[in-house]
Amino acid sequence: MEPFVISEQIIKEEFSKYTTYTYKFRKDNQELWKLFLSELDFPMVNYSNQELNYQLLYRKEKKYYDNDISILIYHSNKIIAIFPITIAKLNDIYEFTSFGGPILSPIFFDNCDKNLEQQVSEICFHICKKIKNKFKIDKLIFLENNKPNNQVSTWYKVLKNNKYKISCLKEAYINLKLDIGQIEKYLKKKKIMADILKAKKLWQYEIKYTIKEKEWRELKDLHIKVSGKQTRTDKTWLSQLQDINNKYAFAIFLYDKKKLIGGAMYRYTNSSALYAIGAYDRNLFPKPISHLAHFMAIEELKRNKFKWLKMGDIPQESDYNNPSKKEITIGLFKKKFSTDIFDKYIFEEK
């Protein structure tokens, strides 16, 4: 039997134990998934359809054919949670993840009843354990993004009670609810505002909500030049271009006169945004380049009433996935640009 069919049976068995719960699969109900996220006070951009669909495409190019078994969970005909999970097979070995990464926690609607959260968290955990056993997965790794309130979640408690090893990672965010003067104070304190002002004098920029294929190809070519090789296929680049032209993201291109020297893409939901990709001409270092893109993105997002910009991970040598020196250096730069550092948790079986 196909992995999706077997996984669907497991999910069905778990929910059949309760008369008040039903579920639907994200793959057939992406508009409902999008609507649920749009109604959250702090929607996670990494849970968005655009981000998950991109990861599916990226994984397919790596020969991982993921079965998307992500579910929307209903209680009394109302969506109360979403849970993004996938099962894949490569060389007769199964992999149970969230689109290639650690299994993401279920997200509940704001002010959800704690008893419901507890019960649904237990259901989701039991689904994971049964899938793990059925497909002989070596071990499960879970990840939970913390929210600005930093409250310990029900999911955290469920995994802790099941004796999972817990480690803390850090993520950089920019609080766009602050006025621009306050954000500039943070950046000045971290000795980065001077580089932003310098970059403003050196380069020109354009904020793009629609991009022609020829323009996008220029950024791709720059990315290849910087990386020394093409790290992703043309299909993933086309997917990102479509996200921009479909109003799920925007890009900022940087120029020295009329020559492209850098660019960045920011994917967004209704109130939060994510720094997705960037490429900058290293021949111009140590002159500041990306500084201008990020600051212009901050101003643009504030104009459009966004609340948060996620810059990304701040890796440390001790992290579970053994980040490279380059990843650690990039993380330190993101930390400099942040106003807030949030915890996120990795849960590993002991």
Image: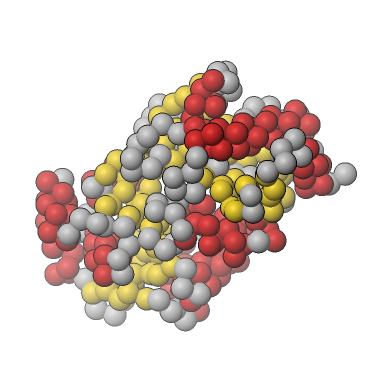
| Residue 349 position in % (x across, y down) | 58, 23
Image mark count: 0
Q: Of residues 133 and 265, which is closer to you in this image?
A: 133
Quadrant in which the N terminus appears: top right
| Residue 164 position in % (x across, y down) | 54, 22
Q: Of residues 326 and 97, which is closer to you in this image?
A: 97
Give the residue at x 59% y 61%: 32
Would residue 44 be seen by someone viewing this image from the given angle?
A: yes
Would residue 101 be seen by someone viewing this image from the given angle?
A: no
Q: In this picture, is 52 found above or below 9?
A: below
Give the residue at x 24% y 50%: 337
Q: Of residues 333 and 32, which is closer to you in this image?
A: 32
Quadrant in which the C terminus appears: top right
Give the residue at x 37% y 34%: 151
Q: Of residues 321 and 70, which is closer to you in this image?
A: 70
Outermost residue on the right side: it is: 1
Q: In this picture, is 240 found above or below 24?
A: below
Residue 201 as seen in the image, left or right of residue 246? left
Q: Quadrant of residue 236?
A: bottom right
Residue 91 as seen in the image, left or right of residue 181? right
| Residue 134 position in % (x across, y down) | 78, 31
Give the residue at x 38% y 47%: 312
Q: In this picture, is 217 found above or below 20?
A: below
